[in-house]
Amino acid sequence: MALRTIVGAMLALAIAGSPALACQGEEIYSDDFADDSGMWGDPPDWMKIGGGSMELKLQPGYRGIAFFRGGQQKEFDVCVDITYPEAKKPDGGTVAGIAFWFKDWENHYVVGTTPVGAVGAYRYNKDKLALQSPFRSNPAVKGGAGAQNTFRVTVKGNAITIYANDQRIAGFRGTPEEAWMGLYAESEQDNSNAWKFSNFRLTEPPK
């Protein structure tokens, strides 16, 4: 499915946050999205920050990334709460999550989730899409519009581990890159979906 792409740049300045139980390593960056104080630059019209969340609401058929601009990350441990939007096709019509090892739109990884509570991962390599971890529902993940879950992605060496609500969901291996990471969302082809992210924390990976 071809999607148009747009990108939101983020300025990497650390402010206090209170994310999940995991991600307890040396802090790189955290944010509770209490307000938009200019820490994230000038958000485009599809990004709203304030009141404890960042909302990414892409136009129908679009995908976008809010990049962490504190430097390129090869290894990291990231935690964020994600709230599911209303969706016409909640099982795969819209996806959001964490993008990493992002060189460009033709070369990157995404750990994503859909509003039914399915979690998986895929990679674009030279603009060819390859599934890295099948999207599956899990008892640890609560699905449905308005449901919130805490997702964690640990990237160390070539190993990627996915957690939800402090439960290990899946793991796979990839090709490490000194590249960008950020929060990712895409809307359904015929609907604009409002994904919300909160309690973001980025730390060094576990030793």
Image: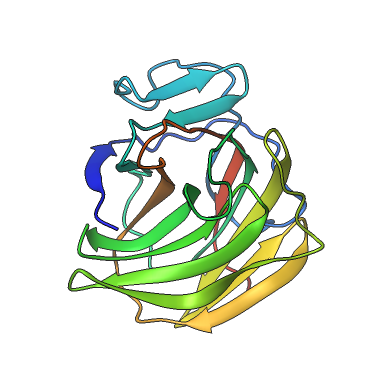
Residue at point 48%, 21% (across, down): 49
Vertically, is 16 above or below 82?
A: above
Residue nearer the viewer, 199 or 117: 117
| Residue 26 at x, y percent in the picture | 59, 56
Quarter of the image with the N terminus in it: bottom left
Q: Using residue 94 as the reference point, say whether residue 197 is left or right of it.
A: right
Vertically, is 183 above or below 159?
A: above
Quick check: can you spot residue 75?
no
Vertically, is 55 above or below 91?
A: above
Q: Using residue 121 as the reference point, say whether residue 65 is left or right of it.
A: left
Q: Using residue 162 as the reference point, say whether residue 192 is left or right of it.
A: left
Residue at point 46%, 17% (across, down): 36
Residue at point 61%, 16% (across, down): 51
Which of the 4 image quadrants contains residue 175?
A: bottom left
Residue at point 29%, 23% (across, down): 44
Quick check: can you spot residue 3?
yes
| Residue 138 at x, y percent in the picture | 75, 65
Q: How is the image coloured?
A: rainbow
Residue nearer the viewer, 169 or 84: 84
Residue nearer the viewer, 18 or 52: 52
Residue nearer the viewer, 92 or 100: 92
Quarter of the image with the C terminus in it: bottom right
